[in-house]
Amino acid sequence: MAQHIVKAFDEQLNQLDAKIAEMGGLAESLLADAIEALSKRDAEVAADVVTGDRKLDQLEDEVNDLALRLLALRQPTATDLRAVLAALKISSDLERAGDLAKNIAKRAITIAKASPIAPVTGIVGLGALVQGRINTAIDAFVARDAKLAMDVWSSDEEVDQLHTSLFRELLTYMMEDPRNISACAHLLFIAKNIERIGDHVTNIAERIVFLVRGKAPERERHKEDESSSTEVRPLKKEN
């Protein structure tokens, strides 16, 4: 980041970066804890995620306040202006990711009361994948690394494919035994929430590319998620 004549300007921009990094770390932690609560059937950990989301909301408010002060008092231009605007949008994506992690935790509390079900393992894998993408995206933001951000942007296809696979697996469990319907329905929502967090991370990656290069990724991102498709395909049962 180039140095400015007014030292306080640099300090405020650095504060903005620090708050985004803190939000990213917290969002990643909330998702990890929500998935842990699901896999270990730990309602107490899930409850901590629900309350922990408030801190993320508070940080978003702090980012908004600082960004608005920078816009009003410093009138940033060029890269500095893009940095402030990117921070505003990224904080919104991270806050939404926290809301989705909270929703996962709430459903984990309900699932903890039901009998264990096998597809939870696949959801843990999906959660770990998205968790890693959050971490990498924040690293890209702090380092102003557009190439790393593009790697995150491109990896969304893997998340979509895994989500679609889980969707089909859960439907199979529901068809094979009606007693699985309630738990699997909650798991379907959880898987979708994780996939939506992945979409927010993709948004963050796009904003980082714009911040660094002054333009968004040129090629259109191909969505591999087929869980919302209206086409009905036969489900394959394993022997």
Image: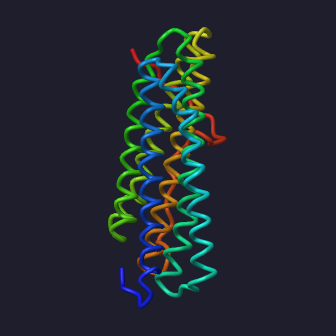
Q: Position of residue 174 (x, y in %)?
A: 58, 17
For residue 62, what is the image quadrant? bottom right
Q: Is residue 62 visible?
A: yes
Q: Position of residue 10 (x, y in %)?
A: 42, 79
Q: How many numbered callouts? A: 0
Up-down: is 193 above or below 134?
above
Residue 91 relative to residue 125: left or right: right
Residue at image point 55% right, 48% down: 56
Up-down: is 234 above or below 131?
above
The chosen color scheme is rainbow
Residue at image point 56% right, 32% down: 104
Residue at image point 56% right, 84% down: 74
Name the one closer to the observer, 118 or 233.
118
Q: Is residue 218 visible?
A: no
Residue 212 relative to residue 63: left or right: left
In the picture as drawn, the residue positioned furthest to the bottom comes out as: 5
Up-down: is 68 above or below 111?
below
The quadrant of the picture occupied by the C terminus is: top left
Q: Position of residue 226 (x, y in %)?
A: 55, 43
Residue 177 relative to residue 18: left or right: right
Q: Position of residue 216 (x, y in %)?
A: 50, 74
The quadrant of the picture occupied by the N terminus is: bottom left
Name the one closer to the observer, 163 or 128.
128
